Amino acid sequence: MTQYGFICFYRQVLQPLDLTRILILLVLATTVFQWSALDRIKAATLDETIRVAIVKSAAEVTVSGDGLLVTNEAGSPLVMSFPAKVKFLKNGLLVEGRRFQRLSFSASSAVYVNNKPYRGLAELSVTDKGILVVNQLPLEEYLVGLINCEISSAWPIEAVKAQAIIARTYALNRKKSRMLSTYHLESSVVDQVYEGSLIEDSRARRAVSETEGEVLTYGGVIIQAFYHSSCGGRTESSENIWGISIPYLKGVECQYCQTSPAGTAWACKLFLKEIEERLLLAGHKVSGLSEIKPGAVNSRGRLKQVILMTSHGSSTISGEQFRKAIGYSSIKSTRFVVNNSNNEISFSGSGNGHGVGLCQWGAKQRALDGFGCGEILSYYYPGTQLKKLSDIR
Ligand SMILES: [Zn+2]
């Protein structure tokens, strides 16, 4: 058979039949490859875990739940009755007369720590000041629990999705910088407020699911996604708060949160004596406090300084130091005016929080105005890009 004849045979016999088969196989192979790639992306996202400190310096912790699995520091399973009361000892944890260095509790549904449900596992260990409980769980589950602690999942869904993305971004940035620490995040306003799975709901889950694995980046790197409740008119630059200039945290105009006075305006009355006590407790040497005066205002409308008038003269402290000393729940922002009346001082201000990054109440209004979560985020963090976690690793 000549070469030509072979080619003819190949064309006549193989082409009509096998070409169709080859095409089908190619389509199948491409589909399978795409499925496995999607699975890999999903797995990469779902495999990501986070460690959150949920109880610190406790003398006693109660753990309960259905079908709990308990292991000690060596990973050996333990038999224990529930609810288990774990007590702090200087060099260990005491439970049912036995002493341990570390205890891990996990369940298919939830582990209850001091009657609050947590997904994943709860790890109890000893510190100098008491029992530390760390909740380790998949990052995406953590986000579902967090949404209603930070905002309301009943807000427009694009604002809830924006919250899910920045919380994920913030958490991963913290995880990277605290990789060697016992835990990555606090469960309070120090990092992100988190109450376990107590107040998670279907809308929070939807927002997390629809943004699965999405993070904000700058130059291909996960950003420091600071955010706050409301800015009161203009978001703050990182430089003014922490002395560090960050290109995507310069501050932007935000009239949007002003449409929600309930989330923005605040007032507080304190006696001079009370203010003096709080300042002293925070380590500021002050005595005979007679008046509080606002100092210079920065370009974002916030007080750079607060002047403390005393019987011995006057001194100044930064607006942020003043807020921290008096209490974040009393002085909600450094955008305030002061009215001295005898021994009582009235503060009235706008904005809640440090003012850096996304303004949550502003994001809510932007979502109501029809903006998508990507547009909301690029407004508050200029120059950043939204990316899938799997694309930057
Ligand atoms: Zn705002």
Image (spheres, rainbow, N blue to C red):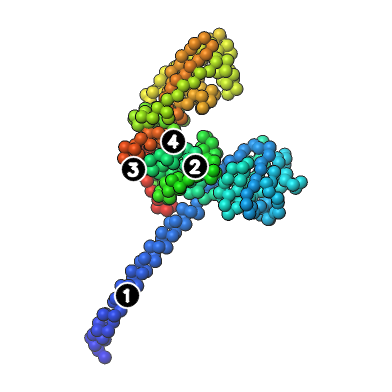
Q: Which residue is mark 3?
A: 372
Amino acid type shown at disc 2: Leu
Does the residue tagged 3 have its C-beta within 8 Å of any atom of ligand 1? Answer: no
Residue 227 is marked as 4
Q: Residue at x 57, y 46 (%)?
A: 118
Under tag 3, what secondary structure?
loop
Q: Which residue is mark 2?
A: 146
The x and y percentages for residue 354 are 45, 30
The image shows residue 266, relative to residue 273, as above or below, that is below
- C-alpha distance separating marks 2 and 4: 14 Å
The x and y percentages for residue 151 are 45, 37
Q: Which residue is mark 1?
A: 22
The image shows residue 339, relative to residue 372, as above or below, that is above
| Quadrant for the N terminus in the image | bottom left
265 or 165, which lies in front?
Answer: 265
- Residue most extreme to the bottom: 1
Residue count near mark 1 (Cα–Cα under 10 Å), binned few <14, some 14–19, many ≥20 = few
Under tag 2, what secondary structure?
helix
Q: Nearer the viewer, mark 3 or mark 4?
A: 3
- C-alpha distance separating marks 1 and 2: 50 Å
The x and y percentages for residue 225 are 43, 39
The answer to whether one can see residue 178 in this image is no
Q: Earlier in the sequence, mark 1 or mark 2?
A: 1
Amino acid type shown at disc 3: Gly
- C-alpha distance separating marks 3 and 2: 21 Å
Q: Nearer the viewer, mark 1 or mark 2?
A: 2
Q: Earlier in the sequence, mark 2 or mark 4?
A: 2
Amino acid type shown at disc 4: Tyr
Residue 101 is marked as none
Q: Kindly check if marks 3 and 4 are in contact, taking CB atoms under 8 A apart as contact.
A: no
